[in-house]
């Protein structure tokens, strides 16, 4: 039997529910006794590669898991408008202004206590006083704008976006948004395997597009 790891859709984004290890996609080719060649494709827990003890090594057929995941994604947000996020950090110099005012208070207190009695020190005092005063006036004149976050539709749905991406782009898209698929072996009596999809940061964009947050709870 020949085995090789392959970069599939959920490589790195699928997690073993028992030990938390990442799952990778294996393609194994086996020659049967009758000479027939058969290929097995599945996602497997990588705990053994990391010398981590896992008492319930998760393993699931590649096609099955990807079909379940895609169904969850499309049913939950496929119909919703794709949104892009813009952040205006705003402007607020309150903290810096307070530091400068405290520095001015210390400077004046030191002067009153006679710490600038020599001509050289007094000249330094007046220079520092002038610089601090100018900086305080400058900061006081600047506007204060709160941080704002806005979302704008791109004109297409998430289903449109998904359809327009290849496997590599899809995998990176999921990883950047912390979307995860948690896979369990024998999650309950009579069930050999189970999976839960967690939407990560993608939930934020879906909600901005009008999807109810309750519809984006973990999909199992």
Image (spheres, helix red, strand yellow):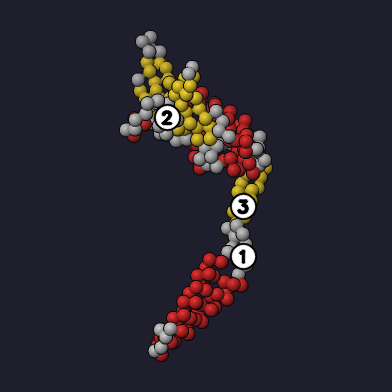
| Residue at 48% over, 81% down | 108
Q: Disc 1 and disc 3: Cα gap in Å?
A: 16 Å
For mark 2, what is the residue? 18
Q: Secondary structure at mark 1?
A: loop
Mark 3 or mark 1, which is nearer the start of the sequence?
1
Percent of width and height locating residue 182: 48, 31
| Quadrant of the snapshot with the N terminus | top left
Marker disc for residue 50: none
Percent of width and height locating residue 76: 62, 33
Percent of width and height locating residue 67: 54, 26
User: Do we see residue 58 in this rendering?
Assistant: yes
Q: Is residue 215 left or right of residue 31?
A: right
Which residue reaches farthest front? 113
Number of numbered callouts drawn: 3
Q: Disc 2 and disc 1: Cα gap in Å?
A: 49 Å
Percent of width and height locating residue 53: 34, 30
Q: Are marks 2 and 3 in contact (CB under 8 Å)?
A: no
For mark 3, what is the residue? 149
User: Do we see residue 193 in this rendering?
Assistant: no
Residue 219, above or below 134: above
Label 3 crowd (10 A; few <14 / some 14-19 / many >=20): few
Q: Splitting the image into 4 quarters, where does residue 155 fall?
A: top right
Residue toward you, 28 or 22 = 22
| Residue at 64% over, 48% down | 151
Q: Disc 2 and disc 3: Cα gap in Å?
A: 37 Å
| Residue at 53% over, 39% down | 200
């Amino acid at each position: 039997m020949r085995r090789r790891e392959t970069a599939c859709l959920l490589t790195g984004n699928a997690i073993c529910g028992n030990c938390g290890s990442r799952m990778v996609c294996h393609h194994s080719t086996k020659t049967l006794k009758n000479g027939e060649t058969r290929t097995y494709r599945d996602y497997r827990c990588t705990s053994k590669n990391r010398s981590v003890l896992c008492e319930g090594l998760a393993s699931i057929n590649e096609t099955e898991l990807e079909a379940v995941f895609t169904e969850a994604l499309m049913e939950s947000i496929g119909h919703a408008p794709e949104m892009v996020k813009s952040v205006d950090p705003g402007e607020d110099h309150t903290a810096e202004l307070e530091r400068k005012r405290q520095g001015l208070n210390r400077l004046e207190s030191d002067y009153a206590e006679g710490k600038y009695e020599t001509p050289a020190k007094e000249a330094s005092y007046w220079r520092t006083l002038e610089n601090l005063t100018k900086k305080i006036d400058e900061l006081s004149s600047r506007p204060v704008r709160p941080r704002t976050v806005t979302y704008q539709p791109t004109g297409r749905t998430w289903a449109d976006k998904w359809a327009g991406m290849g496997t590599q782009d899809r995998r990176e898209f999921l990883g950047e948004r912390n979307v995860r698929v948690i896979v369990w072996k024998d999650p309950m009596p009579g069930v050999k395997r189970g999976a839960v999809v967690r939407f990560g940061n993608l939930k934020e964009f879906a909600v901005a597009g009008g999807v109810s947050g309750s519809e984006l709870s973990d999909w199992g």
